Image: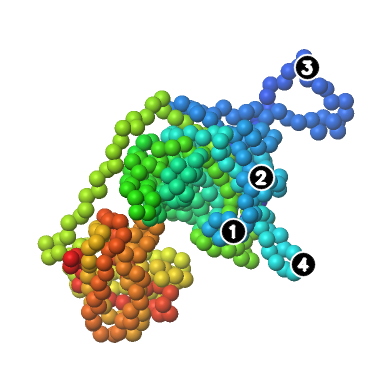
Amino acid sequence: MKKNIASLCVAAALVCSLSGCGSNTAAPADTDNAAIPATEEAAAEAQTPVEATKTPGILGYNLLWSDEFDGPELNKDNWNIELRDPGWTNNELQAYVDSPENVSIKDGCLCLKAIETVDEAGNKSYTSGKVNSQNKQDFMYGKVVIRAKVPAGQGLWPAAWMMPTDEQKYGQWPKCGEIDIMEVLGNDTSTAYSTIHYGEPHGQQQGKLVLEDGSFDDGFHDYSVEWTPGNIKFYIDNNQVLETNDWFTAVEGEDEKPYPAPFNQTFFVQMNLAVGGDWPGNPDDTTDFDNAEFLIDYVRVYQKDMYNTNVTKPVIEMREPLEDGNYIVNGDFSDETEDLEDDVDWKFLLAQNGEGAAVIKDGMIEITSTAEGDVDYSVQLVSWDIPIKKDSKYRITFDAKASKPRNIVVAVTAPYVNWIRYFPDTELAITDSWETYTYEFEMTDKTDPRGRLEFNLGHRGSTETVDITNVRLEEIE
């Protein structure tokens, strides 16, 4: 069982510089007017005044607003407590309610707590907390800094994010835009994500920080975004995880709105602790709801004196194919120095309980698996940044064999456009002899300079070794 994180917040509050929780320093006594307790019991019950935390400045910025959560209750001048029924979005299980059990101030932290209830028939239901600053602390452009501690547990999904004040200005989500300052999945608290969503079709760009030691539920961490006209940067513990200036928004069949829409309108901050949903999956018997608390030490919003709004959308250059027309670099794996861990050319990836390795040798790549994992992409080989142009036709070819017959999945995907498929996930049977596989597809979606060719070996009922070579993706019309 984990240590109670509320207790940790109490202890950490005594050393503000280490924990970030609100200060518990006693205010100087007013000896002329102080009430003197008549008994020892009254003295023990006397409340020690709490000195408000002075929000620090940031060079080049002015403080726009902040909440250090030092008061006895949630400051309703800054926050609304949002009410939502279960299943309102993402197939989440919780109801967001206005209850002191779900939303409270504890020892200088905002505490959003998820609660599981089991009825006499054994049916489970969930309540949780969500707050937002809509129509109270809305702003356009600035730097947002949030210090928080997340809970661990399957199905828990804490988030701090931003949505536009007027969601209908450019149309409903995702056309309206969304800025996710931080998200952590409770089943893997070693990784934190920062993301923007936009456009129609739905586009997204995501960065993440994976801790080599420890996890984000071990203590408080800093999450921030710097939002300026035409540029958005995300930081986790002062590590930049994403910088982007390439986005769009449009209504299907219409021209794009003038850049930098949709991120040129007022947004508000919101924070919540979701339970279940499409991304984290549902809780299970291992989920510790006694400690399912999302603790936020502070929210600070800063702005510069002025911003240059005269910005234009950057032109993304479409990478040219190689001289032989192939868009796949090192498709014959003749370069054995290829780094399979970076985001250039080829990369080997493992996820969701997949285990394995990849090595380039003898003019091919050899992929060995020791655990197939839970999903297709649990064991995955990808080729990055392939330009896929609207109304063009393409051909994929490659040679492959396996140590024993087995199946794999091939696809051309859009990691920056909500993972849509330009060439759909296609399962194929690989034999123990070299064979050539050929597929053709037509690009009907918006031109994408950063498509991705995938070979997925996970979750196919086999861990047999797969060899691949002579990979080509070429435009044929």
Residue 210 shows up from this direction = yes
Q: Quick check: 293 above or below 23?
A: below
Q: Earlier in the sequence, mark 1 or mark 4?
A: 1
Q: Residues within 10 Å of mark 2 (few under 14, many from 20)?
A: many
Identify the element where label 3 is drawn: loop
Tell me the residue that label 3 is attached to. 33
Task: Name which residue lies at 22% across and 79% down.
Answer: 436
Q: Earlier in the sequence, mark 3 or mark 2?
A: 3
Q: Which amino acid does the dot numbered 4 rest on? A: Glu
Q: Which amino acid does the dot numbered 1 rest on? A: Gly
Q: Earlier in the sequence, mark 3 or mark 1?
A: 3
Task: Name which residue lies at 34% across and 69% down.
Answer: 424
Image coords of residue 90 (percent x, y): 53, 58
Identify the element where label 1 is drawn: loop
Tell me the residue that label 1 is attached to. 87
Image coords of residue 159 (percent x, y): 53, 49
The nearer-to-camera label among 4 and 3 is 4
Q: Which quadrant would residue 359 be assigned to in this image?
A: bottom left
- How far apart marks 3 and 1 lie (CA) works out to 54 Å
Task: Name which residue lies at 18% across and 67% down.
Answer: 476
The nearer-to-camera label among 1 and 4 is 1
Tell me the residue that label 2 is attached to. 103
- How far apart marks 2 and 1 lie (CA) works out to 20 Å
Q: Earlier in the sequence, mark 4 or mark 3?
A: 3
- How far apart marks 1 and 4 lie (CA) works out to 23 Å
Q: Quadrant of the C terminus?
A: bottom left
The nearer-to-camera label among 3 and 2 is 2
Identify the element where label 4 is drawn: loop
Left or right of 29 in this view: 387? left
